[in-house]
Image (cartoon, rainbow, N blue to C red):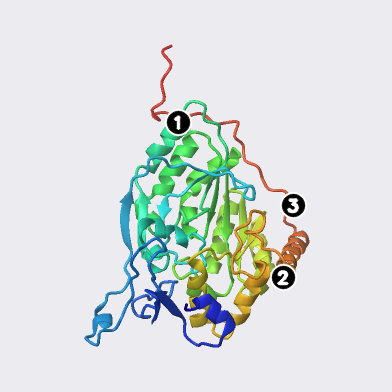
């Protein structure tokens, strides 16, 4: 049985990443076809009975393949609110306006979800996107349901609600309009400067204690960011967005997420310092998570972009996951465990204390909620 890319990258000096397919190994997708993308390969999803492999037939077949262009498909879900009971996250209800994410962050833990659509968690995840049409109408209906109890809705917990296609589809803005009408609390996490477009909605909500935003900053190095998060705004522009939100009165924080061992971990204090100077007043971090296919995708990326760091980086990841590349145990999956993870946590705590970030998180109000009109609920006769 052939070893995975991650196993080889951590245990050998093989210079080029390879992917598994149909029991054999083949090169990743040609650089010209994936220009501007994060993943190196596009291996079939884990539920597929057949594996797709790009193979040279000596007739120029590979050269004739087109580049990966963004394709958007409509999805019509029955519900828009997603509920969870995970004990190690701070929200019970979330919304994901899109499936897949054009930002192309190679480390994204949501990549494996594309396998449920019969697509690859690799390049398909960042080029074959799904927009949830009718999200605002669905949200109105669910908020108007008898017995609905308002809790802060988290948006941006899976894929970015302000990814590039939001400019034209405006699903996120339509969702915010419904939440504003209902005086419903919302917490947003994004990498995108596009969130500033909606300050006209977010600022009045924030004034009533109903909204807060966090910008995710993985690195301050624009070259690393370009390779790791190819279609996300530059780190400097994200810091500028933090400042714009803060000036508008929107409570804004920074997420050092993910902390990438051996690649970006040394930047934590600088990120926190720069974000605080721009107006961030809350902070958090998440250790790199590599579930399922993300493991090999990230290893391939390391071997291509940081061949000299690949072995050490994956070794440090294992140090945070009890010898594995991922541990999904509640209470450990976000922060990891072991000496290295402990050190990262202590650095974060000390930096936050020195810089002046508060220890407690801002709580949003839920007592102002009024079910939105036109949500399909039964009206009173009198």
Whether residue 170 sits left or right of residue 265 in the image: it is left
Say which element carries label 1. loop
Classify 10 Å Cα crowding around label 1: few (below 14), some (14-19), many (20 and above). many
Say which element carries label 2. helix
Residue identifier under label 1 = 372
Say whether residue 100 is visible. Answer: no
Distance CA(mark 3)–CA(mark 1) = 35 Å
Quadrant of the rendered image containing residue 103: bottom left
Residue identifier under label 3 = 359
Earlier in the chain: of badge 2 and badge 1, it is: 2
In the rendered image, the vertical position of residue 311 relative to residue 183, given as above or below: below
Can you give x and y, in whole percent of width and height, for residue 195 in the image? 49, 54
- Residue at 42% of width from left, 34% of height from top? 140
- Residue at 41% of width from left, 72% of height from top? 37
Say which element carries label 3. loop
Front of the two marks 2 and 1: 2
Residue identifier under label 2 = 340
Can you give x and y, in whole percent of width and height, for residue 313 in the image? 61, 77
Q: Nearer the viewer, residue 214 or 137?
A: 137
**Residue that sits furthest to the left in the current view:** 59
Distance CA(mark 3)–CA(mark 2) = 22 Å
Earlier in the chain: of badge 3 and badge 1, it is: 3
Q: Nearer the viewer, residue 288 or 18?
A: 18
In the rendered image, the vertical position of residue 241 relative to residue 203, given as above or below: below
Quarter placement of the C terminus: top left
Earlier in the chain: of badge 3 and badge 2, it is: 2
């Amino acid at each position: 049985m052939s070893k995975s890319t991650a196993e080889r990258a951590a245990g050998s000096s093989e210079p080029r990443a390879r992917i598994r397919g149909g029991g054999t190994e083949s090169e990743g997708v040609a650089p010209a076809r994936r220009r501007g993308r994060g993943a190196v390969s596009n291996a079939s999803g884990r539920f597929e009975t057949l594996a797709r492999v790009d193979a040279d037939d000596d007739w120029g077949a590979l050269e004739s393949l087109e580049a990966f262009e963004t394709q958007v498909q409509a999805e019509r879900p029955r519900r828009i609110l997603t509920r969870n009971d995970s004990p190690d996250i701070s929200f019970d209800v979330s919304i994901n306006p899109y499936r897949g994410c054009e930002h192309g962050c190679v480390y994204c833990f949501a990549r494996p979800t594309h396998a449920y659509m019969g697509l690859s968690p690799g390049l398909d995840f960042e080029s074959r996107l799904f927009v949830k049409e009718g999200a605002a109408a669905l949200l109105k209906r669910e908020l108007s349901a008898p017995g609905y109890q308002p809790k802060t809705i988290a948006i941006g917990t899976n894929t970015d609600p302000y990814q590039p296609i939001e400019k034209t589809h405006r699903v996120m803005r339509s969702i915010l309009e419904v939440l504003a009408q209902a005086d419903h609390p919302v917490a947003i996490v994004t990498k995108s400067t596009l969130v500033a477009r909606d300050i006209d909605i977010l600022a009045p909500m924030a004034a009533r204690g109903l909204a807060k935003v966090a910008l995710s900053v993985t690195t301050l190095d624009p070259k690393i960011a370009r390779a790791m998060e190819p279609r996300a705004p530059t780190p400097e522009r994200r810091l500028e967005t933090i400042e714009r939100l803060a000036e508008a009165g929107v409570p804004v924080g920074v997420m050092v997420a993910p902390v990438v061992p051996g690649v970006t971990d040394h930047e934590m204090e600088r990120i926190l310092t720069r974000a605080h100077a721009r107006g961030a007043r809350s902070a958090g971090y998440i250790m790199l998570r590599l579930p399922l296919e993300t493991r090999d995708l990230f290893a391939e990326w390391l071997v291509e972009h940081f061949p000299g760091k690949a072995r050490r980086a994956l070794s440090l990841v294992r140090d945070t996951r009890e010898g594995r590349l991922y541990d999904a145990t509640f209470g450990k999956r976000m922060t990891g465990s072991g000496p290295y993870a402990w050190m990262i946590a202590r650095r974060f705590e000390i930096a936050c204390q020195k810089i002046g970030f508060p220890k407690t998180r801002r709580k949003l109000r839920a007592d102002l909620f009024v079910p939105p009109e036109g949500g399909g609920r039964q009206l009173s006769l009198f």
